[in-house]
Image (tube, rainbow, N blue to C red):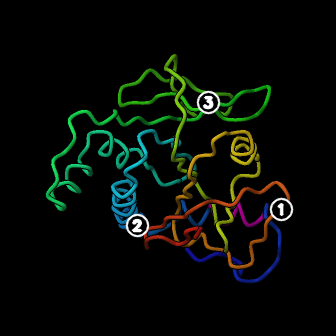
Amino acid sequence: MPLPFDPTAPSRDKAQLRRLLQAERLGLVDRQQRVAQLQEVLRVWLALREEDTTVGAYWPIKGEFDPLPALFRWTEGAEGALRDEQHREPHPEDAPPRRIGLPVMNRETRQLRFHLWYPGCPMEEDAYSIPKPKGTDVVVPTLLLVPCVGFGPGGLRLGYGGGFYDRTLAGLEPRPFTVGVGFAHGFVPWLEAEPHDMPLDAILTEEGVAWLRRD
């Protein structure tokens, strides 16, 4: 479904842009193919991030890409085993467990903390009717997957306008490596940073790595 406006035109109307990009995302006719491709991109990315054992993720809403299948495979070590086989190295038996955290909002600070999630984990709805882990331990992610409504040059992310991730990242120490995840249709070349925006370290789409910060 084509957008009823030109996303390359610098209208700067982010509220309208959010609505239209969400509508386009929900209407993608080749969605299943894009999802499968992005699952593969994410699996490869996780396999290369050997230093990370705790990943902060999200529960998908409003047509967002669901990262949890790839993450579940990662916790089971499927990708690690594949990597070790390719390099012909033994898989370390004493490797630390891999954990997934899902966000829970602190109503006072309006920041996110991450609680352990696993398939079958007890869940409850938060104030926005989004499922969250119930009664599980707080985890501190070293890698954070961030859903993108849209994205722009330099690792800029277009979210839903609530500022939850920006506030969270501003308060996390040490800051995790941040990876935006979304479909390629969401690229907005004229997107500009606002004072509170925290650029991402990388952005993944079904087409591969769309952005990677170079140190």
Instruction: Tell me which numbered mark, 1 or 3, is placed earlier along the sequence.
Output: 3
Residue nearest the viewer, comparing 114 with 25 = 114
- x and y, in percent, of residue 53 in the image: 41, 40
Magenta residues span 16-22
Residue 15, by quadrant, is bottom right
Viewer-side label of 3, 2: 3
Judged by its main secondary structure, the magenta piece is helix
Secondary structure type for disc 3: strand
User: Where 102 sits versus 32, above or below?
Assistant: above
**Residue position for label 1:** 194
Q: Amino acid at mark 1?
A: Glu
C-alpha span from label 1 to label 2: 30 Å
* Residue that badge 2 annotates: 34
Q: Which mark is residue 121?
A: none
Quadrant where the image shows the N terminus: bottom right
Q: In this rendered view, identify the residue nearer to me: 37 or 197.
A: 197
Instruction: Give residue 104's mark.
Output: 3
Q: State if disc 2 and disc 3 touch (CB < 8 Å).
A: no
Marks 1 and 3, how far apart at CA: 25 Å
Residue drawn at (52%, 35%) of the image: 102
Q: Please say whether residue 119 is one of the residues in the magenta stretch.
A: no
Crowding around mark 3 (Cα neighbors within 10 Å: few <14, some 14 to 19, many 20+) is many
Residue 101 shown left or right of residue 38 in the figure = right
Q: Is residue 21 magenta?
A: yes
Label 2: element kind: helix
